[in-house]
Every structure is written in structure tokens, then in C-alpha cells.
Amino acid sequence: MENKLIINQIIPFSNVDGSGNRCAIFLQGCNISCIYCHNPETINYCNDCGNCVNACKYDAIHLVKSRIQYDKKLCTSCNACISICPYNSSPKAILYNVAELTELIKQYKPFIRGITISGGEPTLQKHLIIDLFNRIKPLGLTCTIDTNGFFDINEMEDLINITDKFLFDVKTVDDSFKLCGVANLSSLATLEYLLKKNKIEEVRTVVLNSYMDGKKTVEKVAQLLLNHLEVTYKIIKVHTLGLSKQRQNKINDFIPSDEEILELVQIAKDLGLKKVEYVL
Ligand code: SF4
Ligand code: SF4
């Protein structure tokens, strides 16, 4: 298993995961658990508990020698298995070795500008991504990583060097525990470092009142981006799609209004940013 990427999903052609048409590869496994995560089934690795087997009406999941086996041909994508999983995981994750994945990407090459590794958190599978990028870049494709920003740059230097661009979340500038489930994480120093290396394409902040301070976060990010006006800052209103009822109930009262998001956009522009986008 260590020699294979654990992939939740591959979208052959995406135009929302970096510049141009891209093959987007979503890895399984994350180092945090955001209250608003819209694909929580990517957070943990499957522990083969078997709880989802009987939830599948299409006989696509089995326990074989105590390991989950998934048959893609029988799957109707009803996602009953994901809804029932108590561990924020998915029985549909697929293992790929880097050579297999490279061959698959080659089939898409005429139609894409590059690939984007998303998740989950891609940096958790760093060594295999470096191997993949070493094979993909000679094909003339660009390599992008979509990260939550919570990684140690001292351990990621080789990955940073080979990556063309990062799509980078700044989730909060206050303590991360309430929002992300893990305390004392900060991504600002990492963002500053990547900006200096010209590795940032886009910074994103999802706004959720009470769990983070939108104004303070936007002001801090804007300060860092002032010397990098080519970078897009995207300010996103939290949405509840894909969330369990339990998580929806926790955030329903704290969803910002459209006006609040537009005010944050104006704050970023007033501070001097040129490329500010928003999602309502
Ligand atoms: S998504 Fe696929 S594997 Fe999961 S329950 Fe539905 S048919 Fe079965
Ligand atoms: S996907 Fe979830 S419910 Fe199914 S076997 Fe894995 S951990 Fe258990």
C-alpha cells in the first residue's frame, strides 16, 4: 500500500481546479477535519470495518479476507455507503501505482493543460506525488497542488520545488481548533514562503462566522498578497452541500450573508489587491 497512491476520485477534465482544463486527482486522507468539509469522505483511510457492505443495494462492496473490496462496474454512485460510514471514509478509494496513473493521464494529455492534486491533503502522500510529477512534467503538463496549507515547509522542500503552483487555503488566522478540529495550526508562514518562491496561483478563504474571523483573516492575507498582485484571492461563502445533518446544524446559524462576503471583498480591494474573486 505504501507504494500506491490512495485516490478517492479522478475527474479527467476540470476547469475549476487551477488554470485551464486539468485532470483533477483527489487523494484520500487529510490531516484536519474542517466543520464545513464538503467531501468529508476523503478525510480518513478506510479501516475495513464493513459497516457499509449491507448499505450497498447493488452488491458493489464486499469484505474479502477482512478487507473491503469495491466493484466499480456495479456501482451506481448512489453514495449510500458514504452516508453510512461512521469514519469519514469511503470504500471506493482506489490504489494506483504511479506508473499506472501516469499512463491514465497520458490518455487525457491532448485535452488538458496539466494536473491538479487535491484531496484530502496531498502533502500527506508527498513521495508518490514527487514521483508522479517527475513523470508528468516531461509530457509538457503543469503540476498543481491544492492544499489546506497545514504542512511543514522544512519537510516539503523537494515537493515545493517540483510543483508549478499551489492553490492555497488560509482557513483562519486565529486558533484552528474550533474550525479544523486540530489546535495551533497556522499556514501564514508557509504562504509567505511560497509567495516568495512564486509558487502561489490562488489563495482561498471560506468564510464562516463565529468559527473564524473573516475580516481579520482577509486583512492578514491581503497584507501578504500586496507584493504579489498577480495572485488571485478568492473569498468564498460557506455552503452546506455534502455535509451531514449534524454538521449542518452546527453551522446553519453562522453562514454569512451575501452582503458580508461582498464587504470582505471590498476590504481586500481597498487594501490594494487587484485580483479578488468571490463565491456566494
Ligand atoms: S455508491 Fe456505489 S458502492 Fe456505494 S452504496 Fe452506492 S452503489 Fe454501492
Ligand atoms: S468505508 Fe467506512 S464503513 Fe465502509 S468499511 Fe471503510 S471505514 Fe467501514
Image (cartoon, rainbow, N blue to C red):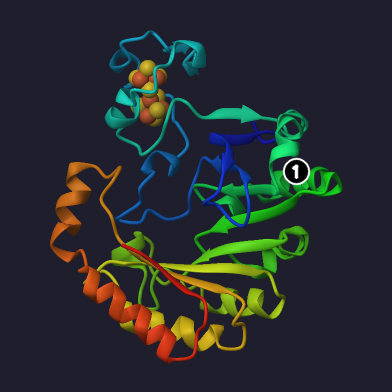
Q: Is residue 213 visible to us here?
A: no
Spot occupied by residue 142 in the image (x, y as percentages of width and height): 74, 53
Q: Quadrant of the C terminus?
A: bottom left
Q: Furthest-bottom residue in view? A: 271
Q: Nearer the viewer, residue 191 or 123?
A: 191
Q: Furthest-top residue in view? A: 59
SS class of the residue under badge 1? helix
Q: Residue at x 69, y 39 (%)?
A: 111
Q: Residue at x 60, y 80 (%)?
A: 192
* Rendering quarter of residue 49: top left
Q: Nearer the viewer, residue 264 or 51?
A: 264
Judged from the image, the quadrant occupied by ligand 1 is top left
Q: Is residue 41 left or right of residue 153?
A: left
Within 10 angstroms of label 1, few (less than 14), some, or many (20 or more) residues?
some
Image height of 259 relative to 135, above or below: below
Q: Is residue 143 visible to us here?
A: yes
Q: Which residue is mark 1?
A: 132
Spot occupied by residue 279 in the image (x, y as percentages of width and height): 36, 62
Q: Residue at x 55, y 36 (%)?
A: 11
Spot occupied by residue 54 in the image (x, y as percentages of width and height): 30, 13
Image height of 158 relative to 56, above or below: below
Q: Residue at x 43, y 11 (%)?
A: 62
Q: Quadrant of the N terminus?
A: top right
Spot occupied by residue 71 in the image (x, y as percentages of width and height): 50, 13
Q: Amino acid type of disc 1?
A: Leu
